[in-house]
Image: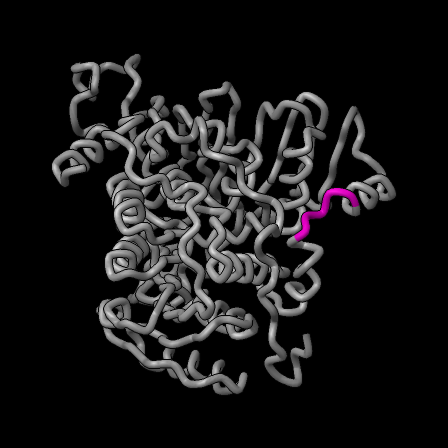
Amino acid sequence: MSANRRHFLRDITLGTGALLTGLPAIGHENEKEKASPIVGPAGFNMSGYAAPKLDKVRIGFVGLGMRGPGAVERMSFIEGVEIKALCDKFPDRVKKAQKILTDAGLPAAKEYTGNEGWKAMCESNDLDLIYITTPWSLHTTIAVYAMEHGKHAASEVPAAETIEECWKLVETSEKTKKHCMMLENCCYDFFELLTLNMARNGLFGELVHVEGAYIHNLLDLNFSKTGYADMWRLRENGHRNGNLYPTHGLGPIAQCLNINRGDQMDHLVSLSTDDFQMSAHAKELAAKDSFYNEFTPLKYRGNMNTTVVRTHKGKTILVQHDVTSTRPYSRIHLVSGTKGVAQKWPDPARISFGHEWIKDEEMKSLEEKYTLPIVKHIGNIAKEVGGHGGMDFIMDWRLIDCLRNGLPLDQDVYDAALWSAIAPLSEASVAKRGRSIDVPDFTRGNWKTNKPVNLTLDGGGNTGVRKVNANKQL
């Protein structure tokens, strides 16, 4: 697809171009915005694609601030992994990450620093996978560059910030036949995996409606000088209004609905409240510290964004985003069908097949029967290694095991693009007072025949976990 075509799609998604019906984008409140459901013919289908086996997976990490060091430590436990490169624009962060390797008795990695050190890293000939944990705005740029230079890419969430970037990821992955996985760790949380298997086995009947969210009070962290480098996450919240971080809640429930693999999102509507906290907090801080004067004029996103998606098969998906309100953490994770329902948040996780939540004894029986092989195989070790209770380690281990055994990934580039696309699409809908927006089909129709995510360990499961040090005898 040409750059002009992508710019056209971006413009109509944002409501600045003409509607596909030929009517003006502004002034026709009853018209539905379009975002190009299908763009051109399908390329090579990366859904279900098994890349050639890698006996050793040589990894380069870029972004060693918030998420990067934890990823380096987790990967240091996995056999068949060689951590060959570490990159961050701040040299001291690279040194700290290097210490993780030396403390574990592993060889030192090559160091890359500066604003564009990641380019040299991607261009090197001794890497198979680029693991990206930078600010959001760099995710697509680095992932595309990595794939163009012969590496698989694994990106923290979201994988892209614009519809144009989403298409760029898809096009590049299809062209290079390199995996582009978004590191959606919540797909590997224990209850989420349990409900996915139960849904696959029909225990909830026909799924009708699902809900997910990212409700997490980050007000203090976003305004902290020692939090996100250069205050990048606060700046994101200061110029964009929509569901900026949809994938933690969306990923697991999208898998339950077999989105991209049997069903597809059709259109969405999105509304945001006003901002009742961020602007006031910026002014409060600026009154005491002139550093925050820069952040008082920003037009902050609303406290709560609610986005509702309808699928081609008539299912609905609700996704919420709130990072300021004084509320307990929640991803909701509600899966509702004609025969039953599961919900995780607020605690505890619950299941019902009638009018009441089942008792602990029945829940235990369901867990014994429907816990997935990956959890039985690596779950206890994952809890010991850690990372959000173990789900981070399960995700990393599964990624490496698939690459080493030439297996398709659980999350492919179409998932990365579609789940990330909810952010810009929601922004477009909010800007148009909740107008309906069509959701692009990044599979270009292949969702009708793509197979659901494989829930077995067939062909894999042989990747071991090493004893790293005396404190982690696994």
Our reading of the magenta stretch's main secondary structure is helix
Q: Is residue 196 above or below residue 296?
A: above
* Farthest residue, direction right: 361
Q: Can see residue 54? A: yes
Q: Residue furthest left?
A: 4
Residue 372 part of the magenta-drawn span = yes
Q: Which colour scheme is used?
A: one colour
Question: Image quadrant of residue 335?
Answer: top right
**Towards the viewer: 63 or 407:** 407
Depth check: give the residue in front, 281 or 334. Answer: 334
Where is the C terminus found, in terms of image quarters? bottom right
Whether residue 78 appears in magenta in the rendering, the answer is no
Q: Point out the stretch of residues depicted in magenta.
A: 369-373
Give the tally of numbered discs.
0
Q: Quadrant of the N terminus?
A: top left
Q: Where is residue 412 in the image (x, y as percent from the top left)?
A: 42, 46
Q: Is residue 68 left or right of residue 350?
A: left
**Position of 93 relative to 70 (above/below):** below
Q: Which residue is drawn at 28% across and 59% down?
A: 142
Left or right of 240, for residue 266: right
Residue 245: x and y in percent read 43, 46
Is residue 324 among what the camera can see? no
> Residue at left 47%, top 68%?
55
Residue at the location (30% across, 18% down)? Answer: 32
Estimate the x, y position of residue 263 in percent, counting from the top left: 48, 27
